Image (spheres, rainbow, N blue to C red):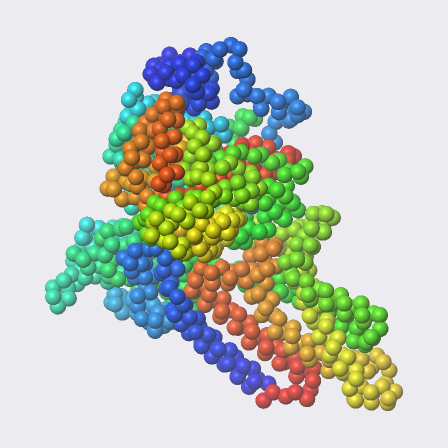
Amino acid sequence: METKKIHPLIPEAQEELRKGNISRRDFLRISTLLGMSLASAKLLAACAQPPASPVATEAGPAATVAVTEAPKAGPVRGGVLRAATRVERVDHPARFSLVSQSHAWRHVFEYLTYTDPKGITQPYLLEKWEASDDLLTWTLYVRKGVKFNNGQELTADDVVFNFGQWLNKDVGSSLLGAMSYLDASGVEKKDDYTVVLHLNAPSIFIPEHLFQYPAAIVPKTFGGDITREPIGTGAFTMAEYVPAERCRLVARKDYWRNGEDGKPLPYLDELLMVQLGEDRSADLAALQTGQVDTIIEPPVSVWEAVKDDARFEVVSTPTSATRVLRMRVDQDPWQDNRVRQALKYCHNREKILAVALQNQGTIGNDSHVAQAHPEYVDIPPFPFDTEKSKALLAEAGYPNGVTVELVVASDWPESMAYAQALKEDAAAGGFTINLKTMPASQYWDGWTEWNLGITWWAHRTLAPMLLPLAYIADADGKPVPWNETRWVDEEFSKILKEAEATLDLPKRRELVGKLEEIQKERGSVCIPFFMNVWKIYDKKFHGIVPSPEEYAIFYETWKEA
Amino acid sequence: MARFIVRRLFTMFLTMFIVSMLVFAIVEIAPGNVARNILGAYATPEQEKSMENQLGLDRPIIIRYISWLLGSDWQVSRRLGMPVKEIVISQGVVERYHQWWAVDENGDLVQWDVEGGKLIKLVRQPDGSVVQVLDDQSWKFDEDGNAYFWGLDTANRAALWMPGQEGTEYRLEYSGWIEAADSPVDYIPMSKGLLRGDAGISLRYKRPVSEVIGRRISNSLILAALAFSVSIPIAIVLGLIAGLNEGKPVDRLISLGGLITAASPDFATGILLIMIFGMWLKILPGATVFLSETAIFKDPRMLILPVLTASLVEIGYVLRITRSSVVEVMNSAYVRTAVLKGLSQRQVVLRHVLRNALMAPITVIMLHVNWFIGGLVVVESVFGFPGLGNFILNAALYKDVYAIEAGAMVLIALAVGTQLIADIIYSLINPRIRYA
């Protein structure tokens, strides 16, 4: 065990684990968030668990794989991975608001931390971090000897610069809403490799926020456009980037991490990412005829087509990713909560899940909290009841029903299916829904502005990490940049703040349950389902990690010779 | 003939001129305006006004049209009182990045910025770096004594700063609205104009239209050329065989085949071909994956299925028209005469039937050239082919006005060009046709 002081919250969490209030995974998550190394945390977890309990749960799947499959030779070097994806227009990574904007660039730029597929956050560009007992002061230790691809070394100055960008209103990063516990003035450089964060409010999510896709680390000289300055610490350099068409990444020789063979990563020589048209309709044919090796962020239709195909590895992961029907509460008719509730009553959730996802997901209760979140409380959604909807509309002053325009991106089949199912069912409930379809690029260009629309939301590890992005106001009382519905609820914001600072999982679960209840009753969104996601790739490739966030990480990917 | 060609070219330029004005006018009177289409229906009036101002959309339509056609740099140069210059640099992965600079009396390249009410001159050094110089003495004053300054900002726009009444600039980024203070109150976007080879900046890609569209045109031309060289000879030969054997089993067979290929929608044939040759037989790639710009030359096999899909439809049409044309000619008096005077079947067909029967198919083929290049949206979509059809479709959906304009210009040039070629071929085939 480490000789240095252990954060006082860790023994508490260990106690919870002993009592069975939290799972081993939750304990590992919490203790690593508080700066403990994963190995030490595992040791503590083993101490806390009764000997009879199956210690192997965590290692279980890995062990079975090792037994059932013939021992594989280690990674082979060389080769090219061809991936079908979207190649987005980008400028500043802090302004990324689509996971797809990060697919290519996360191989050029890296993050301070890394959250593994099990939700455990580990140091990455940081060597380690420490949190004060009151969770108000965080010390980040920058890893030494990491070099940008222009030869410059990564230091505390770069880290401070990046925090400055994320917290600068003029840059407009979504991290500004997520990191509401921090001001730019609270970021202090202690020495060349140490940065101290002084928080306004206690929070344990800093390490996880540092792995959010807009938190890519750029050098302190960065001017604001990564296509013009593709200078990062990652294992690849960007050789070509044509938005909406393709990009090419080439392996770097002097990357700081080593592979299993003791030589610097990556194993692959090149990554090629290509976008096959605006609607990506040719992706499946390209995969099936061997022209690409993987489809990043595959839709359910691709999963259906290849799930039984022996050539492909298909890995399924439940997530908190969803399609959010969002109602602008500062505009008619959604100002009236009764109208919002009425629309919630028009949701035939089982049917929507079936038509939109072939049941590849879980039912939502109109709160942005999913079963994939550790804090989830099972609160049943409003039932499908069009009579109730009509009554609510009449009460709200729409006895003859109401006509609304629903904006949907035609490239997202789940959203389209959801919209069409809702349109049919809501007609009986008094809603005449006119669908306005447009390409996703156009939807995104005004996504915070539509009156009624279905927005694509990515997965976040924890509910209290996700909710502050879209359902609160900033310090001046204005809705945060991603608050697409302008919904701000005093009680909700208060409980959320409390939940953000609550480490104890049973207690946090209680608070999140209240948040779910509020959002279900008077919130501004309808969320009928949460989706599964898939990694689908040619079996010749190994080392592609599943990711509920749908991050594409090919640093340790290798191809059979 | 030369006079005829000159006249045709003149007509072409006149058509392009008129259509370009029409496209401008249609975008202008279409419900909503360009700024609204970029911002969405729920932007605030200030945000919309700021966006229109930055894109120069608040200026009169005539001025905007002239700027699109002839450029705005000379207008700006007059306001600034110094020449302006466009330089192209390469930085990062952006191969060609355009920058506009003013040239001051020392011959230096300069831009301006205002920070905290102070005018700052940005002087470009020979090595590409920029030195900031305080330039507060350059403010000009109007008759009321208010300071103002016209300069070039760092985003390729001429900008008017007026201290004390700075506008707030709203920019719509992916993550939402961004407000910037100390901003200019008026803008003129810089451009060279279409006649000098600058088709404007695509609102969708934020890159020069000419750079985005160029590759699309060449891709589509290659696809169309291949499809034509496959389909036309086959269609004409089959049509001729069918027409010469009117009513016989071989005619029935060919006619039926032509009907089937012409009637099957191209997305259905495309997907069927992918399933047969790509997935079942596994001998051909099922999509055109452009892993590099020259991918179709490195792996031409991936063009086979798109070309085949496009050709099948074309073969059906041309075959049927050739057949009926041949049948008609075969029944004409001069063919009967030729047969009766004892010419061999071969001579009759080659010298009398073929020439006369080809007029109709050539008309159809030439009309289809345009459709092939601009209208193959379905084939492009099925195979993920980055062609012109998809480009124009998406530009129209997005109301990317300069991209629509460029697409329209290309298609008109093609339409008139192919018609010209058709006319020349008519006169070669049928010496009775003379153009003066």
Residue positioned most to the right? B342
Reply above or below: B201 against A469: below
- Is B359 positioned to the left or the right of A120 in the image? right
Which quadrant is the N terminus of chain A positioned in?
Answer: top left
**Could you tell me which residue is drawn at 72 percent across and 64 percent down?**
B260
**Could you tell me which residue is drawn at 65 percent across and 87 percent down?**
B433
Residue placed most toward the observer, A221 or B230: B230
Residue placed most toward the observer, A385 or A491: A385
**Could you tell me which residue is drawn at 54 percent across and 62 percent down?**
B388
Residue A553: give x, y in percent of width and height. Answer: 51, 36
Residue placed most toward the observer, A257 or B82: A257
Corner quadrant of residue A27: top left
Report whether residue A385 is seen.
yes
Reply above or below: A258 against B51: above
Residue B142: give x, y in percent of width and height. Answer: 15, 66
Residue positioned most to the top? A51
Which quadrant is the C terminus of chain A positioned in?
Answer: top right
**Could you tell me which residue is drawn at 18 percent across and 53 percent down?**
B117
Residue A533: give x, y in percent of width and height. Answer: 53, 38
Corner quadrant of residue A153: top left
Residue B246: give x, y in percent of width and height. Answer: 81, 76
Report whether residue A228 is seen.
no
- Is B148 positioned to the left or the right of A433 in the image? left
Number of marks drawn: 0
- Is A462 positioned to the left or the right of B424 in the image? left
